[in-house]
Amino acid sequence: MSISQNLLQKYAELIVRTGANVQPGQVVQLTIAVEQHAFAALLIEECYRAGAKKVNVDWTSDAKSRLDFLYADQETLSAVLPWEEAKMRQMVEDLPCRIFITSEDPDAMRGIDAGKLSAVMQSRAAVRKPYRDAIEGKHQWVIAAHPSEKWAKKCFPDAENAVDRLWDAILATVRVSEDADPVAAWKAHTDFIERKAAWLNDQRFTSLRYSSANGTDFTVRLIPDAKWEGAGAVNARNGAFYIPNMPTEEIFTSPLAGACEGTLVAVKPLSWNSQLIEDFSITFKDGRAVSCRAAKGQELLEKMIRMDGGAAMLGEVALVPKESPVNRCGFLFYETLFDENACCHCALGMGFKEVLPDGDDLTMEQAKQRGINDSIIHVDFMVGADDLAIDGIRPDGTVVPVFRDGTWA
Ligand code: ZN
């Protein structure tokens, strides 16, 4: 174990103070794997130091989840019991600050019946939805990562010190180091992202045009009043600024569903349902993916695009410069929290109604009328080639360079 106590302490402080921004008197709900109990203790203490009234913990275990799916039946696993609902009702009352620490083994559910898995997730999500909607926008939350043995081995199969290497990578992406001040680094980082998002919003681009020597040649229309967002969010109830994802590098919006043309060529493999899709491209016509080609995982990619009516349309376009610390790590994390922050990407499937000015008050059906895509999937794929050029088209037809050579123009 080469990771120092000083670094762990700095990281815990960053998650609690800058990420979740725990306020005096708030209840905190921490979700973390049992294996990470030592780091949980650091987080819990830091929450209390920040003035938390009470810290509650949901302990998770990959092993237990897997055994549940192997041995318990679908009906039993799908049921949300009265005590679980009581807990969610309490959450609506407390509006706790939520901290999620992910350390999941990317292969934890390998071999488990995919139909059973998604049926259970869907029926539990349906019961949880009203509670989730009731706290949406009214509480602070953050997702950050902690290595686990299995996750590290997946990233570095041949390394003896896989966990240390994953630690080094995670800390580099969240700007934590022995000598620098991560809080100051994050302030500068979020300020930069907010300036860029404000610039994009001022431009009022009606569409974006992508091109690269790799074959990417693509145009996507944007929703006129949709906002570009990035980095932070504000709890509408208490005005606290928080950072939902650590790391985060992207500035994103939801494009107009059903209004894009051309081909996007992926620059990184895509991990979906614990399987890899490699060297692939997707061609769109009238806003829908009409064909795709993959050197590996062709069938899987086709299946993904046909998941439902919205799976063939885009729900997200995101801008990330190629200098991103995630990209500099140079390996696949098998975890969207990291992989989607490597470079520019698009996502097939569900869009974000929050990017509409009154989005929080809209139902998904209303958001759909305004051009936000709806689907049960949301799958990010990376298109940020080193030579990627993106032009923005203003309402009067003026063309403005946004990205050149994979980074801000
Ligand atoms: Zn994204």
Image (cartoon, rainbow, N blue to C red):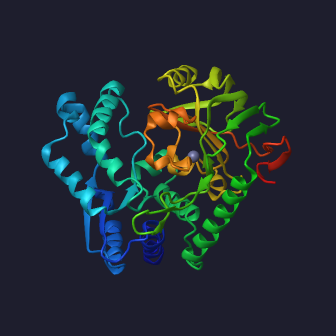
Q: In the visual, does 382 lie left or right of 158?
A: right
Tally of numbered discs: 0
Q: Residue furthest right?
A: 398
- Res. 92 in view: yes
Residue 45 found in image quarter? bottom left
Residue 137 position (above or below residue 385): below
Residue 169 position (above or below residue 362): below
Name the spot of residue 253 as percent of width and height, x first.
61, 46
Decide which of 187, 400 is in the foreground and name it. 400
Quadrant housing the C terminus: bottom right
Name the spot of residue 3 as percent of width and height, x first.
47, 69
Q: Residue at x 36, y 40 (%)?
A: 108
Q: In the visual, does 174 lie left or right of 345?
A: left
Quadrant housing the N terminus: bottom left
Q: In the visual, does 105 lie left or right of 317?
A: left
Q: Residue furthest left?
A: 82
Name the spot of residue 119 as percent of width and height, x first.
31, 28
Decide which of 218, 359 is in the foreground and name it. 359
Name the spot of residue 219 as percent of width and height, x first.
74, 33
Residue 8 found in image quarter? bottom left
Decide which of 77, 155 is in the foreground and name it. 77
Q: Residue at x 19, y 47 (%)?
A: 85
- Res. 404 in view: no
Q: Residue at x 67, y 29 (%)?
A: 259
